Image (cartoon, rainbow, N blue to C red):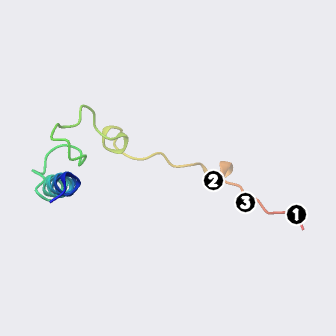
Amino acid sequence: MDWQLYLAGIAIVAAVVYVSRRAWRTWAHKGSGCGGGCGSGCKSASPAKSSGQGRLIPLQQITVRRERE
């Protein structure tokens, strides 16, 4: 066999191992953290949770924009 065939086989095996590892880390998530899959928890809470409720836009600031014909 040629040396290039061995090199191609090693590259294919490395790619399969890499994709398999990434898929396993995505599917076997421990449930903690912010869902990034990095294994470390978030340092800050999301803005919606930390402020209690989301801010509403006052009715006076809502305008309808129409294109001129």
Q: Are marks 3 and 1 in contact (CB under 8 Å)?
A: no
In the picture, measured across the screen, residue 6 lies left or right of residue 47, that is left
Which of the marked residues, 2 or 3, is nearer the chain's N terminus? 2
**Which numbered dot is residue 59?**
2
Total label count?
Answer: 3
Q: Amino acid at mark 1?
A: Arg
Viewer-side residue, 39 vs 23: 23
Residue carrying label 1: 68
Rounded to the nearest angstrom, the CA distance separating label 3 from label 1 is 13 Å
Q: Position of residue 60 (x, y in %)?
A: 67, 50
For discs 2 and 3, the disc positioned in front in the rendered view = 3
Residue carrying label 3: 64
Q: Quadrant of the N terminus?
A: bottom left
Viewer-side residue, 41 vs 28: 28
Q: Position of residue 2 (x, y in %)?
A: 19, 56
Which of the marked residues, 2 or 1, is nearer the chain's N terminus? 2
